[in-house]
Image (spheres, grey):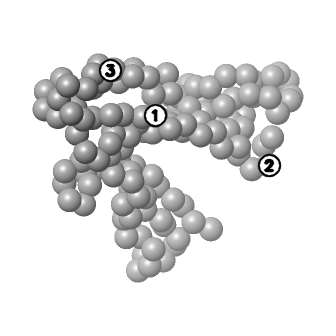
Amino acid sequence: MQTVVYYLKKSANATTISLWRRVFNGDPAAGQTPQELIEGVESMQLRYGLDSTMPDPDGTIDSYVTADGVTDWGRVVSVRMSLLLHAPDAAAADVAVPASGSVNDVTITYPTSGSKYDRRVFTTTIAIRNRI
């Protein structure tokens, strides 16, 4: 049994933000070293797929909500995760880039000063085992 925590913090070279993970396996001496996974991650947004059919769940996702919107974690059947990443190199000065974007229903306003970057959102949905 392991617990894996994913989070955003400054990259190892301190030039950008990265997605990191830390694995906890019950042994304090092993597996707990933070691992940098992806550089250039500006935002990570999670939504939880709820089966709110009453009285008995039918296995169909009725809505996606944030963690504070989950009242019964036993009804969560999936997790939708979105990452906003920016390119490693700045865009040319004459390239038009959007001022904002949507990441899993959250509007992100991009910085207006400094270098401009091409950005992309990557989204995946993960089914919770034994729930669907």
Picture coordinates of residue 12 (x, y %)? 24, 60
Residue at position x 50%, y 27% in the image: 104
Picture coordinates of residue 56 (x, y %)? 86, 28
Per the model, the C-alpha gap separating discs 1 and 2 is 29 Å
Which circle's residue, 3 or 2, is located before the other in the chain?
3
Residue at position x 21%, y 33% in the image: 92
Residue 130 is left or right of residue 24, and the answer is right
Q: Is residue 36 above or below residue 72?
A: below
Residue lying at the far left of the rendered structure? 114
How many numbered marks are there? 3
What's under tag 3, amino acid-wise?
Pro
Residue at position x 49%, y 22% in the image: 105
Q: Are marks 3 and 1 in contact (CB under 8 Å)?
A: no
Are there few (<14), some (14-19), or many (20+) residues within 10 Å of tag 2? few
- Mark 3 secondary-structure assignment: loop
Per the model, the C-alpha gap separating discs 3 and 2 is 41 Å
Per the model, the C-alpha gap separating discs 3 and 1 is 13 Å
Which circle's residue, 1 or 2, is located before the other in the chain?
1
**Circle number at residue 121:** 1
Picture coordinates of residue 113 (x, y %)? 13, 27
Residue carrying label 3: 98
Q: Residue 127's image quarter?
A: top right
Q: Are marks 1 and 2 in contact (CB under 8 Å)?
A: no
What's under tag 1, amino acid-wise?
Val
Q: Nearer the viewer, mark 1 or mark 2?
A: 1
What's under tag 2, amino acid-wise?
Asn
